[in-house]
């Protein structure tokens, strides 16, 4: 799990399965999701997890119509698959990811 920005987004998401976490530094729910995402990153090694600060990368956030954080975007081979917002427990996040990345 690592931070990227709008300059590296296309390269980082071009191949494979990717979960993008749009967050802000002042968002408490975003901070609640960090340990959940770290656990998922350790267990789901076939899915790359990337974090993007929505305030610092507003052009990219606008591209995905991010209106609230945290918002999670699933991509497969650079193609949009699904999006959801809010705090989610690990089991529900994994289920959502698997259902949308078939």
Image (cartoon, rainbow, N blue to C red):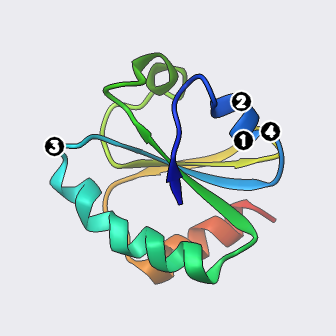
Instruction: Mark 3 or mark 2: name the one nearer the start of the chain.
Output: 2
Q: Quadrant of residue 26?
A: top left
Rendered-image quadrant of the C terminus: bottom right
Element under disc 1: helix
- The residue positioned 35% from the left and 74% from the top of the image is 35
Residue 95 position in % (x across, y down): 59, 76
Q: CA distance from mark 1 to mark 2?
A: 5 Å
Question: Decide: marks 1, 3 in contact (CB < 8 A)?
Answer: no
Q: Marks 1/4: CA distance?
A: 4 Å
Q: Which residue is mark 4?
A: 14
Image: 88 above or below 29: below
Residues under numbered marks 1 and 2 in contact, where contact means CB atoms less than 8 Å apart: yes
Badge number at residue 13: 1
Residue 56, disc: none
Q: CA distance from mark 4 to mark 3?
A: 29 Å
Tell me the crowding category of disc 1: few under 14, some 14 to 19, or many 20 or more residues within 10 angstroms, Cα based: many
Residue 19 in the image: state x and y as whole percent. 60, 54
Determine the residue positioned at 53% across, 39% down: 4
Q: Residue 68 location in percent, x, y?
A: 30, 38
Instruction: Kindly indicate whether the residue at mark 4 contacts the one at mark 1 (C-beta within 8 angstroms).
Output: yes
Residue at 45% from the left image edge and 69% from the top image edge: 37
Q: Earlier in the sequence, mark 1 or mark 3?
A: 1
Q: Is there a contact, CB below 8 Å, between mark 2 and mark 4?
A: yes
Question: Image quarter for residue 28?
Answer: bottom left
- Residues 38 and 67: in front is 38
Look at 61% across and 83% down and name the residue there.
Answer: 43
- The disc, 4 or 3, on the residue closer to the chain's N-terminal end is 4
Q: CA distance from mark 1 to mark 3?
A: 25 Å
What label sits on residue 26 in the rendered view?
3
Give the Cα separation between the discs numbered 3 and 2.
26 Å
**Residue with the mark numbered 2:** 10
């Amino acid at each position: 799990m690592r931070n990227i920005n709008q300059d590296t987004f296309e390269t980082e998401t071009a191949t494979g399965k990717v979960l993008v976490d749009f967050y802000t530094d002042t968002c408490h729910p975003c901070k609640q999701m960090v340990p959940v995402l770290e656990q998922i990153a350790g267990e789901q090694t076939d899915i790359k997890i990337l974090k993007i600060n929505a305030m610092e990368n507003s052009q990219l956030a606008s591209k995905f119509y991010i209106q609230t954080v945290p918002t999670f975007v699933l991509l497969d081979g650079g193609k949009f698959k699904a999006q959801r917002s809010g705090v989610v427990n690990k089991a529900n996040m994994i289920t959502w990811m698997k259902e949308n990345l078939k």
